Image (cartoon, rainbow, N blue to C red):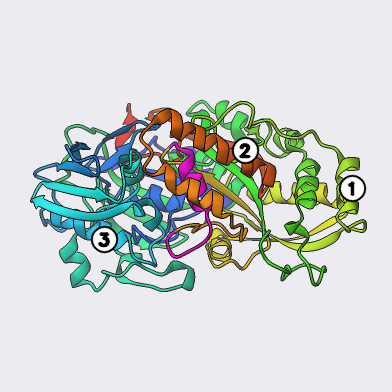
Amino acid sequence: MRFSTRSIVVAAAAACLFAQTAEGRTLKWARSGDALTLDPHAQNEGPTHNLNHHIYEPLIIRDSKGKAVPALAESWGLTSDPLVWEFKLRKGVKFHDGAPFTADDVVFSYERARQPSSDMKQLLSSVDTVTKVDDHTVRIKTKGPNPLLPANLTDLFIMNKAWAEKNNTVKVQDFKNKEENFAVRNANGTGPFMLVSRAPDVKTVMKAFADYWGKDQYKHGVTQLEYIVIKSDATRTAALLSGEVDFVQDLPVQDIERVKNSPNLKVAIGPENRSIFLGMNVGAKELATSDVKGKNPFADKRVRHALNMAINREAIQRVVMRGQSVPTGTIAPPGVNGWTKEMDKYPPVDLNRAKTLLTEAGYEKGFSVTFHCPNDRYVNDEAICQSAVGMLGQVGVKANLVAQSKALHFPLIQKEQTDFYLLGWGVPTFDSHYIFTFLYQTRTEKTGGWNATRYSNPEIDTLTVSLESETDLEKRNATIAKIWNVLHEETIYIPIHIQTLAYGMRKDVDIVVDISNQPKIKFAVLTN
Protein backbone atom coordinates (compact mmCIF):
# COMPACT_ATOMS: atom_id res chain seq x y z
CA MET A 1 0.00 0.00 0.00
CA ARG A 2 1.34 3.42 -0.94
CA PHE A 3 0.79 6.55 1.09
CA SER A 4 1.17 9.86 -0.72
CA THR A 5 1.95 13.14 0.99
CA ARG A 6 -1.43 14.49 -0.14
CA SER A 7 -3.33 11.54 1.31
CA ILE A 8 -1.54 11.91 4.62
CA VAL A 9 -2.41 15.61 4.86
CA VAL A 10 -6.05 15.00 3.98
CA ALA A 11 -6.29 12.14 6.43
CA ALA A 12 -4.71 14.20 9.18
CA ALA A 13 -7.35 16.87 8.74
CA ALA A 14 -10.32 14.55 8.70
CA ALA A 15 -9.24 11.36 10.46
CA CYS A 16 -11.44 9.72 13.01
CA LEU A 17 -9.88 7.52 15.64
CA PHE A 18 -11.21 4.51 13.76
CA ALA A 19 -13.00 3.80 10.55
CA GLN A 20 -16.62 3.52 11.68
CA THR A 21 -19.20 1.40 9.94
CA ALA A 22 -22.79 0.55 10.71
CA GLU A 23 -21.59 -2.78 12.08
CA GLY A 24 -18.66 -1.52 14.15
CA ARG A 25 -15.03 -0.62 13.73
CA THR A 26 -12.23 -1.33 11.31
CA LEU A 27 -8.84 -1.58 12.97
CA LYS A 28 -5.88 -0.91 10.67
CA TRP A 29 -2.71 -2.60 11.87
CA ALA A 30 0.62 -1.83 10.17
CA ARG A 31 3.91 -3.68 10.24
CA SER A 32 7.12 -3.60 8.20
CA GLY A 33 6.93 -7.20 7.04
CA ASP A 34 4.28 -9.73 6.10
CA ALA A 35 3.55 -13.31 7.04
CA LEU A 36 5.52 -15.64 4.79
CA THR A 37 2.53 -17.91 4.22
CA LEU A 38 -0.92 -18.73 5.57
CA ASP A 39 -0.16 -22.45 5.64
CA PRO A 40 -0.18 -22.89 9.43
CA HIS A 41 2.53 -25.54 9.56
CA ALA A 42 4.94 -24.35 6.87
CA GLN A 43 7.04 -21.74 8.70
CA ASN A 44 8.03 -21.40 12.36
CA GLU A 45 8.37 -17.62 12.07
CA GLY A 46 7.03 -14.84 14.28
CA PRO A 47 5.02 -12.62 11.89
CA THR A 48 3.64 -15.72 10.18
CA HIS A 49 2.38 -17.10 13.48
CA ASN A 50 1.17 -13.64 14.51
CA LEU A 51 -1.15 -13.27 11.53
CA ASN A 52 -2.29 -16.89 11.65
CA HIS A 53 -3.20 -16.56 15.34
CA HIS A 54 -6.11 -14.37 14.26
CA ILE A 55 -7.47 -16.95 11.81
CA TYR A 56 -6.43 -20.29 13.31
CA GLU A 57 -6.11 -21.42 16.91
CA PRO A 58 -3.96 -23.90 18.83
CA LEU A 59 -5.16 -26.05 21.71
CA ILE A 60 -3.27 -23.81 24.14
CA ILE A 61 -2.45 -20.14 23.63
CA ARG A 62 -0.17 -17.68 25.41
CA ASP A 63 -1.46 -14.36 26.64
CA SER A 64 0.54 -11.12 26.30
CA LYS A 65 2.60 -11.97 29.40
CA GLY A 66 3.50 -15.43 28.13
CA LYS A 67 1.12 -17.37 30.36
CA ALA A 68 -0.40 -20.51 28.83
CA VAL A 69 -4.21 -20.28 28.77
CA PRO A 70 -6.92 -22.49 27.21
CA ALA A 71 -7.87 -22.05 23.57
CA LEU A 72 -9.36 -25.02 21.71
CA ALA A 73 -8.54 -27.24 24.68
CA GLU A 74 -10.44 -26.43 27.87
CA SER A 75 -8.16 -28.54 30.05
CA TRP A 76 -5.19 -30.88 29.78
CA GLY A 77 -2.97 -33.04 31.95
CA LEU A 78 -1.13 -36.32 32.33
CA THR A 79 -3.10 -39.52 32.73
CA SER A 80 -2.06 -42.30 35.11
CA ASP A 81 0.39 -43.26 32.37
CA PRO A 82 3.30 -40.76 32.50
CA LEU A 83 3.64 -41.04 28.72
CA VAL A 84 0.06 -40.07 27.91
CA TRP A 85 -1.38 -36.56 27.94
CA GLU A 86 -5.13 -36.05 27.69
CA PHE A 87 -6.73 -32.92 26.22
CA LYS A 88 -10.40 -32.08 26.74
CA LEU A 89 -11.55 -30.09 23.71
CA ARG A 90 -13.89 -27.13 23.73
CA LYS A 91 -17.43 -27.98 22.63
CA GLY A 92 -19.58 -25.93 20.27
CA VAL A 93 -16.64 -24.58 18.26
CA LYS A 94 -17.08 -24.00 14.53
CA PHE A 95 -14.69 -23.47 11.68
CA HIS A 96 -15.26 -20.44 9.48
CA ASP A 97 -17.06 -22.59 6.89
CA GLY A 98 -19.50 -23.78 9.55
CA ALA A 99 -18.00 -27.23 10.09
CA PRO A 100 -17.86 -28.42 13.72
CA PHE A 101 -14.47 -28.70 15.42
CA THR A 102 -13.73 -32.23 16.65
CA ALA A 103 -10.89 -34.46 17.74
CA ASP A 104 -10.50 -35.63 14.14
CA ASP A 105 -9.21 -32.17 13.25
CA VAL A 106 -6.63 -32.25 16.05
CA VAL A 107 -5.33 -35.68 15.05
CA PHE A 108 -5.15 -34.61 11.41
CA SER A 109 -3.41 -31.30 12.18
CA TYR A 110 -0.75 -32.82 14.41
CA GLU A 111 -0.01 -35.58 11.92
CA ARG A 112 0.22 -32.93 9.21
CA ALA A 113 2.59 -30.84 11.33
CA ARG A 114 4.92 -33.84 11.64
CA GLN A 115 5.49 -34.06 7.87
CA PRO A 116 9.03 -33.52 6.51
CA SER A 117 8.10 -30.21 4.84
CA SER A 118 6.65 -28.82 8.08
CA ASP A 119 8.78 -26.29 9.95
CA MET A 120 6.90 -27.24 13.12
CA LYS A 121 7.82 -30.92 13.21
CA GLN A 122 10.55 -30.53 15.84
CA LEU A 123 7.96 -29.43 18.37
CA LEU A 124 6.33 -32.84 18.02
CA SER A 125 9.53 -34.89 17.81
CA SER A 126 8.82 -36.56 21.16
CA VAL A 127 5.33 -37.65 20.10
CA ASP A 128 4.63 -41.32 19.45
CA THR A 129 0.91 -41.26 18.68
CA VAL A 130 -2.03 -38.84 18.59
CA THR A 131 -5.33 -40.62 19.23
CA LYS A 132 -8.99 -39.66 19.23
CA VAL A 133 -10.83 -40.93 22.32
CA ASP A 134 -14.13 -39.30 21.43
CA ASP A 135 -15.21 -36.18 19.54
CA HIS A 136 -13.94 -33.91 22.32
CA THR A 137 -11.03 -35.86 23.82
CA VAL A 138 -7.55 -36.42 22.40
CA ARG A 139 -4.66 -38.34 23.88
CA ILE A 140 -1.05 -37.78 22.93
CA LYS A 141 1.45 -40.50 23.79
CA THR A 142 5.10 -39.49 23.92
CA LYS A 143 8.16 -41.67 23.40
CA GLY A 144 9.30 -40.83 26.92
CA PRO A 145 8.04 -38.59 29.72
CA ASN A 146 7.86 -35.06 28.29
CA PRO A 147 7.02 -32.25 30.71
CA LEU A 148 7.40 -29.73 27.86
CA LEU A 149 4.66 -31.06 25.61
CA PRO A 150 1.94 -28.48 26.43
CA ALA A 151 4.44 -25.63 25.99
CA ASN A 152 5.28 -26.96 22.53
CA LEU A 153 1.68 -26.66 21.32
CA THR A 154 1.05 -22.91 21.58
CA ASP A 155 1.82 -22.19 17.91
CA LEU A 156 0.56 -25.49 16.48
CA PHE A 157 -2.65 -24.50 14.73
CA ILE A 158 -5.64 -26.73 14.10
CA MET A 159 -6.95 -27.08 10.55
CA ASN A 160 -10.24 -28.56 9.42
CA LYS A 161 -9.52 -32.04 8.08
CA ALA A 162 -12.36 -32.06 5.55
CA TRP A 163 -11.42 -28.62 4.19
CA ALA A 164 -7.78 -29.63 3.75
CA GLU A 165 -8.73 -32.84 1.97
CA LYS A 166 -11.26 -31.08 -0.25
CA ASN A 167 -8.71 -28.46 -1.31
CA ASN A 168 -5.78 -30.84 -1.80
CA THR A 169 -3.74 -29.28 0.98
CA VAL A 170 -3.10 -32.29 3.21
CA LYS A 171 0.61 -31.93 2.44
CA VAL A 172 2.37 -29.01 4.11
CA GLN A 173 3.79 -26.35 1.80
CA ASP A 174 7.52 -26.79 1.16
CA PHE A 175 8.35 -23.14 1.68
CA LYS A 176 12.11 -23.26 1.24
CA ASN A 177 11.65 -24.81 -2.21
CA LYS A 178 8.99 -22.23 -3.16
CA GLU A 179 6.14 -24.72 -3.31
CA GLU A 180 2.54 -23.46 -3.28
CA ASN A 181 -0.70 -25.03 -2.12
CA PHE A 182 -4.26 -23.85 -1.49
CA ALA A 183 -3.55 -23.07 2.17
CA VAL A 184 -0.82 -20.57 1.27
CA ARG A 185 -3.38 -17.91 0.31
CA ASN A 186 -6.63 -19.33 1.71
CA ALA A 187 -7.66 -20.24 5.23
CA ASN A 188 -10.40 -21.89 7.27
CA GLY A 189 -9.77 -21.74 10.99
CA THR A 190 -11.70 -21.37 14.23
CA GLY A 191 -10.13 -18.03 15.17
CA PRO A 192 -11.82 -14.71 16.01
CA PHE A 193 -11.33 -13.39 12.47
CA MET A 194 -11.93 -15.00 9.09
CA LEU A 195 -10.00 -14.26 5.93
CA VAL A 196 -11.63 -11.90 3.42
CA SER A 197 -8.76 -11.17 1.05
CA ARG A 198 -5.01 -11.45 0.89
CA ALA A 199 -2.46 -9.56 -1.19
CA PRO A 200 0.96 -10.78 0.01
CA ASP A 201 3.33 -8.00 1.08
CA VAL A 202 0.49 -5.47 0.67
CA LYS A 203 -2.60 -6.11 2.79
CA THR A 204 -4.60 -8.89 4.41
CA VAL A 205 -8.23 -8.18 5.27
CA MET A 206 -10.14 -10.17 7.89
CA LYS A 207 -13.60 -9.79 9.40
CA ALA A 208 -14.90 -10.80 12.80
CA PHE A 209 -16.22 -14.36 12.85
CA ALA A 210 -19.86 -14.13 13.95
CA ASP A 211 -19.90 -17.67 15.35
CA TYR A 212 -16.62 -17.40 17.25
CA TRP A 213 -16.79 -19.42 20.46
CA GLY A 214 -15.10 -16.65 22.47
CA LYS A 215 -17.10 -13.65 21.26
CA ASP A 216 -18.69 -13.10 24.68
CA GLN A 217 -15.36 -13.51 26.45
CA TYR A 218 -13.25 -11.31 24.16
CA LYS A 219 -15.21 -8.13 23.51
CA HIS A 220 -12.65 -6.28 21.40
CA GLY A 221 -15.23 -4.48 19.24
CA VAL A 222 -13.34 -4.92 15.96
CA THR A 223 -15.53 -5.99 13.05
CA GLN A 224 -12.88 -5.69 10.34
CA LEU A 225 -9.13 -6.11 10.77
CA GLU A 226 -6.71 -4.90 8.10
CA TYR A 227 -3.10 -6.04 8.34
CA ILE A 228 -1.11 -3.59 6.21
CA VAL A 229 2.52 -3.97 5.18
CA ILE A 230 4.42 -0.66 5.15
CA LYS A 231 8.11 -1.38 4.74
CA SER A 232 9.39 2.21 4.99
CA ASP A 233 9.91 3.37 8.59
CA ALA A 234 9.11 6.98 7.74
CA THR A 235 5.94 6.10 5.83
CA ARG A 236 4.75 3.74 8.56
CA THR A 237 5.12 6.45 11.20
CA ALA A 238 3.47 9.04 8.95
CA ALA A 239 0.51 6.72 8.46
CA LEU A 240 0.07 6.45 12.22
CA LEU A 241 0.41 10.19 12.78
CA SER A 242 -2.14 10.94 10.06
CA GLY A 243 -4.71 8.40 11.18
CA GLU A 244 -4.40 6.19 8.10
CA VAL A 245 -3.53 3.33 10.44
CA ASP A 246 -4.51 2.80 14.07
CA PHE A 247 -1.74 0.53 15.34
CA VAL A 248 1.92 0.18 14.35
CA GLN A 249 3.51 -2.96 15.75
CA ASP A 250 7.11 -2.00 14.98
CA LEU A 251 7.35 1.71 15.70
CA PRO A 252 10.79 2.94 14.53
CA VAL A 253 12.99 3.79 17.51
CA GLN A 254 13.79 7.21 16.06
CA ASP A 255 10.09 8.11 16.08
CA ILE A 256 9.14 7.05 19.60
CA GLU A 257 9.32 10.52 21.15
CA ARG A 258 7.53 12.09 18.20
CA VAL A 259 4.61 9.70 18.56
CA LYS A 260 4.59 10.07 22.34
CA ASN A 261 4.17 13.81 21.91
CA SER A 262 1.22 13.47 19.53
CA PRO A 263 -2.05 14.31 21.35
CA ASN A 264 -4.01 11.43 19.81
CA LEU A 265 -1.35 8.73 20.12
CA LYS A 266 0.51 6.71 22.72
CA VAL A 267 3.46 4.32 22.85
CA ALA A 268 3.77 1.04 24.74
CA ILE A 269 7.31 -0.26 25.31
CA GLY A 270 8.40 -3.62 26.67
CA PRO A 271 11.01 -6.39 26.31
CA GLU A 272 10.65 -9.17 23.80
CA ASN A 273 11.45 -12.80 24.38
CA ARG A 274 13.92 -12.67 21.47
CA SER A 275 17.66 -12.40 20.95
CA ILE A 276 19.41 -11.01 17.88
CA PHE A 277 22.69 -12.63 16.85
CA LEU A 278 25.12 -13.52 14.06
CA GLY A 279 25.55 -17.08 12.83
CA MET A 280 28.70 -18.52 11.27
CA ASN A 281 29.21 -21.58 9.07
CA VAL A 282 31.61 -23.50 11.31
CA GLY A 283 31.16 -26.94 9.77
CA ALA A 284 32.11 -26.60 6.10
CA LYS A 285 35.62 -27.44 4.97
CA GLU A 286 35.65 -24.26 2.88
CA LEU A 287 33.36 -21.23 2.83
CA ALA A 288 31.60 -20.74 -0.50
CA THR A 289 31.62 -16.94 -0.21
CA SER A 290 35.08 -16.26 1.24
CA ASP A 291 38.40 -15.38 -0.37
CA VAL A 292 40.03 -18.05 1.82
CA LYS A 293 40.37 -21.29 -0.11
CA GLY A 294 41.07 -24.76 1.18
CA LYS A 295 39.99 -24.07 4.75
CA ASN A 296 37.26 -22.42 6.78
CA PRO A 297 38.17 -19.43 9.00
CA PHE A 298 35.00 -19.88 11.09
CA ALA A 299 36.01 -23.45 11.94
CA ASP A 300 38.78 -21.99 14.12
CA LYS A 301 37.49 -21.06 17.57
CA ARG A 302 40.06 -18.26 17.79
CA VAL A 303 38.43 -16.54 14.81
CA ARG A 304 34.99 -16.85 16.37
CA HIS A 305 36.24 -15.42 19.65
CA ALA A 306 37.95 -12.58 17.78
CA LEU A 307 34.74 -11.60 16.01
CA ASN A 308 32.81 -11.84 19.26
CA MET A 309 35.06 -9.26 20.92
CA ALA A 310 35.07 -7.00 17.84
CA ILE A 311 31.30 -6.37 18.06
CA ASN A 312 30.53 -3.26 20.12
CA ARG A 313 27.11 -4.11 21.52
CA GLU A 314 26.85 -0.95 23.57
CA ALA A 315 27.52 1.21 20.52
CA ILE A 316 24.77 -0.62 18.63
CA GLN A 317 22.43 -0.07 21.57
CA ARG A 318 23.28 3.64 21.78
CA VAL A 319 23.50 4.62 18.12
CA VAL A 320 21.44 2.14 16.11
CA MET A 321 18.79 1.19 18.67
CA ARG A 322 18.66 4.55 20.49
CA GLY A 323 18.59 2.74 23.79
CA GLN A 324 15.84 0.32 22.79
CA SER A 325 17.79 -2.92 23.25
CA VAL A 326 19.63 -4.83 25.96
CA PRO A 327 23.18 -5.97 25.04
CA THR A 328 23.72 -9.64 25.76
CA GLY A 329 26.32 -12.38 25.77
CA THR A 330 23.90 -15.23 25.13
CA ILE A 331 21.18 -16.07 22.64
CA ALA A 332 18.83 -17.09 25.48
CA PRO A 333 16.56 -14.21 26.54
CA PRO A 334 15.93 -13.56 30.25
CA GLY A 335 12.89 -15.47 31.45
CA VAL A 336 13.88 -18.59 29.54
CA ASN A 337 14.58 -21.57 31.78
CA GLY A 338 18.36 -21.98 31.87
CA TRP A 339 19.24 -18.28 31.56
CA THR A 340 21.66 -16.91 34.18
CA LYS A 341 23.27 -13.53 34.80
CA GLU A 342 26.67 -15.14 34.38
CA MET A 343 25.98 -16.41 30.86
CA ASP A 344 24.51 -13.02 29.94
CA LYS A 345 27.91 -11.34 30.32
CA TYR A 346 29.50 -10.35 27.02
CA PRO A 347 33.20 -9.77 26.31
CA PRO A 348 34.48 -6.19 26.35
CA VAL A 349 35.47 -4.77 22.98
CA ASP A 350 39.16 -5.51 22.48
CA LEU A 351 40.31 -4.89 18.92
CA ASN A 352 43.98 -5.55 19.68
CA ARG A 353 43.23 -8.92 21.23
CA ALA A 354 40.91 -9.74 18.33
CA LYS A 355 43.67 -8.96 15.82
CA THR A 356 46.09 -11.10 17.81
CA LEU A 357 43.71 -14.05 17.75
CA LEU A 358 43.19 -13.67 14.00
CA THR A 359 46.96 -13.57 13.48
CA GLU A 360 47.43 -16.69 15.61
CA ALA A 361 44.80 -18.42 13.50
CA GLY A 362 46.68 -17.50 10.31
CA TYR A 363 44.58 -14.52 9.21
CA GLU A 364 46.89 -11.61 9.92
CA LYS A 365 45.54 -9.80 6.85
CA GLY A 366 41.97 -10.81 7.61
CA PHE A 367 39.58 -12.35 5.11
CA SER A 368 36.33 -11.60 3.30
CA VAL A 369 32.95 -13.31 3.49
CA THR A 370 29.43 -12.59 2.29
CA PHE A 371 27.16 -11.42 5.11
CA HIS A 372 23.42 -12.04 4.70
CA CYS A 373 20.92 -9.88 6.53
CA PRO A 374 17.13 -9.35 6.47
CA ASN A 375 15.83 -5.81 6.04
CA ASP A 376 12.19 -6.24 7.05
CA ARG A 377 12.10 -8.63 10.00
CA TYR A 378 13.74 -7.28 13.17
CA VAL A 379 13.98 -3.78 14.63
CA ASN A 380 16.64 -1.93 12.58
CA ASP A 381 17.98 -5.23 11.26
CA GLU A 382 19.82 -3.81 8.25
CA ALA A 383 21.28 -0.96 10.32
CA ILE A 384 22.57 -3.50 12.85
CA CYS A 385 24.27 -5.39 10.04
CA GLN A 386 25.78 -2.21 8.62
CA SER A 387 27.25 -1.42 12.02
CA ALA A 388 28.63 -4.94 12.34
CA VAL A 389 30.31 -4.59 8.94
CA GLY A 390 32.21 -1.54 10.17
CA MET A 391 33.18 -3.17 13.46
CA LEU A 392 34.47 -6.34 11.82
CA GLY A 393 36.35 -4.25 9.28
CA GLN A 394 38.38 -2.75 12.14
CA VAL A 395 39.99 -6.15 12.73
CA GLY A 396 40.46 -6.97 9.04
CA VAL A 397 37.36 -9.02 8.32
CA LYS A 398 35.56 -7.71 5.25
CA ALA A 399 31.89 -8.64 5.50
CA ASN A 400 30.22 -8.05 2.15
CA LEU A 401 26.66 -7.17 3.10
CA VAL A 402 23.66 -8.54 1.21
CA ALA A 403 20.48 -7.15 2.79
CA GLN A 404 17.15 -8.38 1.47
CA SER A 405 13.61 -9.33 2.37
CA LYS A 406 13.11 -12.08 4.92
CA ALA A 407 11.27 -14.03 2.22
CA LEU A 408 14.64 -14.33 0.46
CA HIS A 409 16.81 -14.37 3.59
CA PHE A 410 15.24 -17.22 5.54
CA PRO A 411 15.43 -19.83 2.75
CA LEU A 412 19.21 -19.25 2.67
CA ILE A 413 19.33 -20.34 6.30
CA GLN A 414 16.93 -23.23 5.90
CA LYS A 415 18.77 -24.53 2.82
CA GLU A 416 22.27 -23.89 4.28
CA GLN A 417 23.20 -21.46 1.51
CA THR A 418 24.81 -18.81 3.71
CA ASP A 419 28.16 -18.64 5.50
CA PHE A 420 27.48 -15.64 7.73
CA TYR A 421 24.11 -14.22 8.66
CA LEU A 422 21.93 -12.32 11.11
CA LEU A 423 19.05 -14.08 12.80
CA GLY A 424 16.67 -13.42 15.67
CA TRP A 425 15.16 -16.17 17.80
CA GLY A 426 12.20 -16.14 20.13
CA VAL A 427 11.48 -18.91 22.61
CA PRO A 428 7.73 -19.57 22.85
CA THR A 429 8.25 -22.51 25.23
CA PHE A 430 10.36 -20.35 27.59
CA ASP A 431 12.80 -23.25 27.88
CA SER A 432 16.39 -23.63 26.62
CA HIS A 433 15.53 -26.92 24.93
CA TYR A 434 13.75 -24.97 22.19
CA ILE A 435 16.98 -23.11 21.40
CA PHE A 436 19.11 -26.24 21.48
CA THR A 437 16.88 -28.34 19.22
CA PHE A 438 16.38 -25.69 16.52
CA LEU A 439 19.74 -23.88 16.54
CA TYR A 440 22.39 -26.31 17.83
CA GLN A 441 21.35 -29.90 17.23
CA THR A 442 22.83 -31.60 14.20
CA ARG A 443 20.63 -30.88 11.21
CA THR A 444 18.57 -33.90 10.24
CA GLU A 445 15.08 -34.34 8.84
CA LYS A 446 13.72 -33.86 12.37
CA THR A 447 16.21 -31.62 14.20
CA GLY A 448 18.36 -28.52 13.68
CA GLY A 449 15.86 -26.93 11.30
CA TRP A 450 17.35 -23.44 11.70
CA ASN A 451 20.94 -24.52 12.33
CA ALA A 452 22.75 -23.16 9.28
CA THR A 453 26.09 -23.16 11.13
CA ARG A 454 26.65 -26.84 10.21
CA TYR A 455 27.63 -27.30 13.88
CA SER A 456 27.38 -30.94 14.92
CA ASN A 457 28.28 -32.21 18.39
CA PRO A 458 27.07 -35.72 19.31
CA GLU A 459 27.34 -34.95 23.03
CA ILE A 460 25.11 -31.88 22.68
CA ASP A 461 22.66 -33.88 20.56
CA THR A 462 22.40 -36.61 23.21
CA LEU A 463 22.03 -34.18 26.09
CA THR A 464 19.39 -32.18 24.22
CA VAL A 465 17.30 -35.28 23.55
CA SER A 466 17.57 -36.25 27.23
CA LEU A 467 15.87 -32.98 28.22
CA GLU A 468 12.66 -34.11 26.52
CA SER A 469 12.08 -36.92 29.02
CA GLU A 470 13.82 -35.77 32.21
CA THR A 471 11.19 -35.07 34.86
CA ASP A 472 13.56 -34.38 37.75
CA LEU A 473 13.77 -30.57 37.58
CA GLU A 474 17.10 -30.35 39.38
CA LYS A 475 18.75 -32.88 37.08
CA ARG A 476 17.18 -31.28 34.03
CA ASN A 477 18.43 -27.81 34.92
CA ALA A 478 21.90 -29.22 35.58
CA THR A 479 21.91 -30.70 32.07
CA ILE A 480 20.80 -27.38 30.59
CA ALA A 481 23.64 -25.61 32.42
CA LYS A 482 26.12 -28.20 31.15
CA ILE A 483 24.98 -27.68 27.57
CA TRP A 484 25.23 -23.90 27.83
CA ASN A 485 28.74 -24.12 29.28
CA VAL A 486 29.89 -26.06 26.23
CA LEU A 487 28.08 -23.85 23.73
CA HIS A 488 29.32 -20.56 25.16
CA GLU A 489 32.89 -21.75 24.92
CA GLU A 490 32.29 -22.90 21.34
CA THR A 491 30.89 -19.46 20.32
CA ILE A 492 28.92 -20.77 17.36
CA TYR A 493 26.82 -17.60 17.41
CA ILE A 494 27.70 -14.00 18.24
CA PRO A 495 24.93 -12.59 20.47
CA ILE A 496 24.17 -8.89 20.02
CA HIS A 497 21.14 -7.91 22.06
CA ILE A 498 17.69 -8.68 23.37
CA GLN A 499 15.17 -6.81 21.28
CA THR A 500 12.92 -4.19 22.89
CA LEU A 501 9.49 -3.58 21.40
CA ALA A 502 7.69 -0.29 20.82
CA TYR A 503 4.02 -0.33 19.81
CA GLY A 504 2.45 2.91 18.57
CA MET A 505 -1.33 3.29 18.63
CA ARG A 506 -4.30 5.60 18.90
CA LYS A 507 -5.11 6.61 22.46
CA ASP A 508 -8.37 4.71 22.46
CA VAL A 509 -6.62 1.48 21.48
CA ASP A 510 -5.14 -0.57 24.29
CA ILE A 511 -2.81 -3.27 23.02
CA VAL A 512 -0.34 -4.55 25.59
CA VAL A 513 3.21 -5.28 24.42
CA ASP A 514 3.28 -9.02 23.85
CA ILE A 515 6.47 -10.61 25.18
CA SER A 516 6.61 -12.89 22.12
CA ASN A 517 5.73 -9.96 19.82
CA GLN A 518 2.56 -11.71 18.73
CA PRO A 519 -0.16 -9.28 19.83
CA LYS A 520 -3.58 -10.84 19.48
CA ILE A 521 -6.33 -8.38 18.68
CA LYS A 522 -8.90 -10.45 20.56
CA PHE A 523 -7.07 -9.39 23.75
CA ALA A 524 -7.23 -5.70 22.74
CA VAL A 525 -9.44 -3.11 24.40
CA LEU A 526 -10.98 -0.26 22.40
CA THR A 527 -12.17 2.47 24.72
CA ASN A 528 -14.07 4.73 22.33
Res. 99 mark:
none
Q: Label 2: which residue?
A: 485
At a point 48% along the width and 68% down the height, the residue shown is: 176
Res. 355 mark:
1
Is residue 481 found left or right of 366 in the rendered image?
left
Image coords of residue 419 (percent x, y): 68, 63
- Amino acid type, residue under disc 2 in the picture: Asn
Task: Tell me which segment is drawn in magenta.
Answer: 430-446
- Amino acid type, residue under disc 1 in the picture: Lys
- Amino acid type, residue under disc 3 in the picture: Glu
Let me know if residue 101 appears in the view: no
- 474 vs 290, nearest the viewer: 474
**For the residues marked 1 and 2, what is the alpha-carbon distance in whole angstroms?**
25 Å
Res. 111 mark:
3
Instruction: Give above or below for 440 relative to 322.
Output: below
Q: Earlier in the sequence, mark 1 or mark 2?
A: 1
